[in-house]
């Protein structure tokens, strides 16, 4: 099928790698790039989820779509992935570091193991992706774009999400620093900051030390307050493609994320 996405001309034939592509925002992003004719590599630690995304991406128009099962927090596995991709498919044009895990619980209820787990995936996963694929882009010298999924939590303090919010604040700053560093090389870096989006992360996150039911009720109240219970991941995917096309630096997505960003 011919590319049907609205950015078809912009992404046709480009190589796009999305992490956390087995579900939610990552999956929707893989589909959006697939509809624009990109060659999509769907990376997730969940093999089945990644495979399903790749299969559907092919049906949506990606001339080629592959699935790779990798844990983004595993440095060696990421190095292997970067080598394999470079050898088998070429240099990635667009990298979307999107894999992430949720964790809520007050500061004193969050154990050092919990901190490590969330920083390993949410921050180190992004660092590995940027180092490995960003270097390949820079060495090739033909530009490219890196998108990191941060969160509105990056600039919106919350006593319920200290570890998660800290990991996302770090991703936001990392993105801005790298953007400055790569500015002269035609490589853009964007930080996407969604608020509450309806995905697995918001329905099945592990709740450390707080009553899971109470936390779910809190999230539902927040969602209701902003009328966001049904904010779909597809709209975040759309913001991601737009951020690449327009080379946007920090992109708050969802109404309350935009509101909080203006106040921060
Ligand atoms: P999700 O849970 O539906 O998707 C996350 C995906 O990442 C899953 O497929 C999971 O298997 C994968 N993943 C987790 N750890 C991984 C690892 N170590 N290596 C490889 N893959 C891994 O959740 P969602 O909402 O789609 O999350 C995507 C990103 O968006 C995350 O970084 C999240 O923090 C961020 N985000 C989500 C918001 C929301 O309200 N849903 C709001 C703001 C940011």
Image: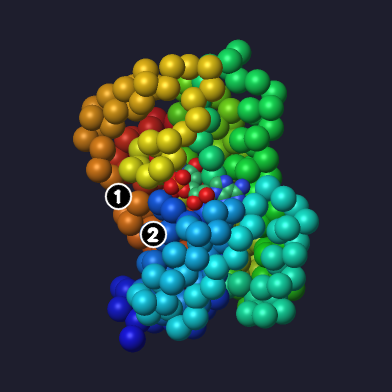
In the rendered image, residue 239, in percent from the top left (x then y), is placed at 38, 56
- Can residue 226 be seen here? The reply is yes
Q: In which quarter of the image is residue 182?
A: bottom right
Sequence order check, earlier mark of 2 and 1: 2
In the rendered image, residue 241, in percent from the top left (x then y), is placed at 41, 64
Assign a secondary structure to mark 2. helix
- The residue that label 1 is drawn on is 232
In percent of the image, x 33 and y 56: which residue is there?
234
In the image, residue 221 sits, relative to residue 178, either above or below, namely: above
In the rendered image, residue 18, in percent from the top left (x then y), is placed at 53, 62
Mark number, residue 150: none
Q: Do the residues labelled 2 and 1 touch (CB within 8 Å)?
A: yes
In the rendered image, residue 185, in percent from the top left (x then y), is placed at 66, 69
53 and 30: which is toward the camera: 53
- In the rendered image, the quadrant that contains the N terminus is bottom left
- The residue that label 2 is drawn on is 28
In percent of the image, x 60 and y 13: which residue is there?
108
- In the rendered image, the quadrant that contains the C terminus is top left
Specify whether 128 is left or right of 237. Answer: right
Q: Does the residue labelled 2 lie within 8 Å of ligand 1?
A: yes
Specify whether 35 is left or right of 116. Answer: left
Q: Distance between the residues labelled 2 and 1?
A: 9 Å
- Can residue 150 be seen here? The reply is no
Q: Which residue lies furthest to the right in this view?
A: 76
């Amino acid at each position: 099928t011919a590319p049907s996405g609205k950015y078809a001309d912009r992404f046709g034939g480009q190589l796009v790698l999305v992490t956390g592509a087995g579900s939610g925002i990552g999956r929707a992003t893989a589909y959006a790039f697939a509809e624009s004719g990109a060659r999509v590599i769907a990376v997730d630690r969940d093999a089945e989820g990644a495979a399903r995304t790749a299969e559907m991406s092919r049906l949506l128009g990606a001339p080629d779509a592959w699935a790779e099962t990798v844990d983004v927090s595993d440095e060696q596995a990421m190095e292997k992935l970067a080598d394999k991709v470079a050898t088998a498919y070429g240099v990635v044009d667009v990298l979307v570091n999107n894999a992430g895990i949720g964790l809520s619980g007050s500061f004193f209820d969050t154990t050092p193991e919990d901190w490590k787990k969330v920083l390993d995936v949410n921050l180190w996963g992004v660092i590995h992706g940027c180092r490995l694929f960003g270097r390949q882009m820079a060495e090739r010298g033909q530009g490219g774009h890196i998108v990191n999924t941060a969160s509105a939590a990056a600039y919106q303090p919350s006593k319920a999400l200290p570890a998660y919010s800290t990991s996302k604040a770090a991703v936001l700053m990392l993105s801005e620093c790298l953007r400055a560093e790569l500015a002269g090389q035609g490589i853009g870096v964007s930080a996407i900051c969604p608020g509450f989006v309806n995905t697995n992360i918001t329905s099945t996150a592990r709740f450390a030390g707080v009553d899971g039911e109470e936390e779910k009720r809190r999230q539902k109240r927040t969602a209701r307050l902003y009328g966001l219970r049904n904010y779909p991941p597809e709209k975040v995917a759309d913001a991601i493609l737009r951020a690449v096309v327009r080379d946007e630096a920090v992109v708050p997505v969802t109404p309350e994320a935009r509101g909080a960003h203006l106040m921060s």
